[in-house]
């Protein structure tokens, strides 16, 4: 049994080796849908302002105007069990970001730690399930980091990055976001991004959580710049905008959560890590966007 646990840990480490993934999880039912299938068309339009972070080295020119990207199915990348949603789709992305200005992009701090991260990664808009190549007009580079901070201590907890892209983004309206006040308990939420690096997904069915087990209450007390939510998210969703479904405003940046997958020793593969909703345990953590400087 100890050997099996060790194998599982090694596989998890290998799967996460190339990117700064922060674990997330599924609460209750899996609410993820393709962005173009989301029930509210206004959010399909907002999604034009959301981008996938993909390493420069993984985008290969196939003509003067088109680029290919790694198309290995996520089932093979992550050694997923059969019948997991979207397991035949590619997963070349490793973070998500969104526009708050014509060429200002916000993401999680752990997605943009240094100038090297800026240089080595592109931001691709419109990465959806029906896309097999990217046009050059979809691909933007990071010109510079405007602001960035990732601190996790008992005294300070923040996780954000603001970057300037190389040019204004075509065909996208920057997202409106909360600038003052607090989001209320039980406010309905929607997250849009690239879970596990997949083509863009939307997931609702979540609300703001302020109560749970003592550990969660204590955690939130030490993290005044965060709120908790039962969002269905994965590594790759880091940096995703979290919307208030009552107002349409972005409330925060998805930054952290529980484990994405759990190893099934009977089949030697990974399954979705599903937990019962309203279980009083840890939830996903969202950095409040009104606390991000420079916006």
Image (tube, rainbow, N blue to C red):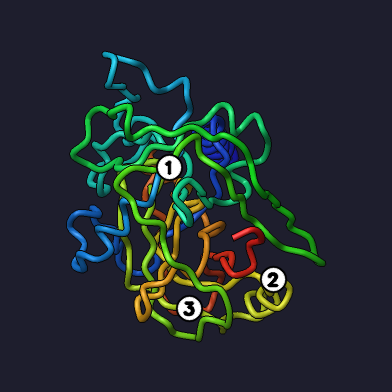
Q: Position of residue 193 (x, y in %)?
A: 38, 52
Is residue 267 at all visible to an observer of this figure? no
Q: Nearer the viewer, residue 249 or 87?
A: 249
173 up-or-down from 227: above or below: above
- Please, what secondary structure does the residue beneath circle 2 have? loop
Q: Give left or right: position of 233 versus 71.
A: right
Q: Nearer the viewer, residue 198 or 101?
A: 101
Count of all numbered marks drawn on residues in the image: 3
Q: Give left or right: position of 222 versus 10.
A: right
Q: Position of residue 282 (x, y in %)?
A: 56, 70
* Residue 208: mark in rendering: 3
Q: Could you give the CA–CA distance between mark 2 and mark 3, rounded to whole angstroms?
A: 15 Å
Residue at the (17%, 57%) spot, across then down? 37
121 up-or-down from 106: above or below: above
| Foreground tag (1 vs 3) | 1
Q: Could you give the CA–CA distance between mark 1 and mark 3, rounded to whole angstroms?
A: 33 Å
* Residue 7: mark in rendering: none
Determine crowd level at label 3: few under 14, some 14-19, many 20+ residues with C-alpha closer than 10 A.
Answer: many
Q: Which residue is mark 1?
A: 168
| Foreground tag (1 vs 2) | 1
Residue at the (44%, 65%) spot, across then down? 242
* Residue 223: mark in rendering: 2
Q: Nearer the viewer, residue 269 or 196?
A: 196
């Amino acid at each position: 049994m100890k050997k099996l646990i060790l194998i599982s840990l090694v596989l998890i480490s290998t799967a996460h080796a190339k990117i700064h993934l922060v674990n997330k999880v599924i609460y209750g039912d899996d609410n993820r849908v393709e962005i173009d299938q989301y029930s509210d068309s206004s959010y399909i339009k907002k999604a034009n302002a959301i981008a996938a972070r993909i390493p420069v080295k993984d985008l290969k020119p196939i003509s003067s105007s088109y680029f290919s990207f790694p198309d290995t199915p996520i089932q093979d990348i992550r050694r997923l069990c059969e019948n997991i949603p979207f397991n035949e789709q590619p997963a070349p992305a490793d973070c998500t970001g969104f526009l708050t200005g014509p060429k200002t992009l916000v993401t999680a701090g752990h997605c943009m730690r240094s100038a090297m991260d800026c240089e080595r990664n592109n931001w691709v808009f419109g990465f959806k399930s029906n896309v097999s190549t990217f046009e050059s007009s979809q691909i933007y580079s990071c010109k510079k980091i405007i602001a960035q901070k990732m601190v996790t201590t008992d005294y300070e907890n923040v996780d954000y990055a603001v970057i300037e892209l190389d040019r204004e983004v075509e065909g996208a309206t920057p997202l409106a976001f909360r600038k003052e006040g607090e989001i209320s308990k039980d406010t309905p939420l929607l997250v849009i991004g690239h879970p596990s690096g997949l083509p863009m997904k939307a997931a609702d069915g979540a609300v703001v959580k302020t109560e749970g087990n003592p550990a969660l209450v204590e955690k939130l007390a030490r993290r005044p710049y965060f709120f908790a939510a039962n969002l269905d998210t994965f590594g790759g969703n880091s940096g995703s905008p979290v919307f208030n479904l009552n107002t349409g405003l972005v409330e925060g940046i998805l930054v952290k959560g529980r484990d994405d997958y759990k190893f099934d020793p009977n089949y030697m593969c990974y399954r979705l890590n599903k937990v019962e909703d309203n279980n009083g345990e840890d939830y996903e953590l969202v950095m409040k966007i009104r606390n991000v400087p420079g916006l």
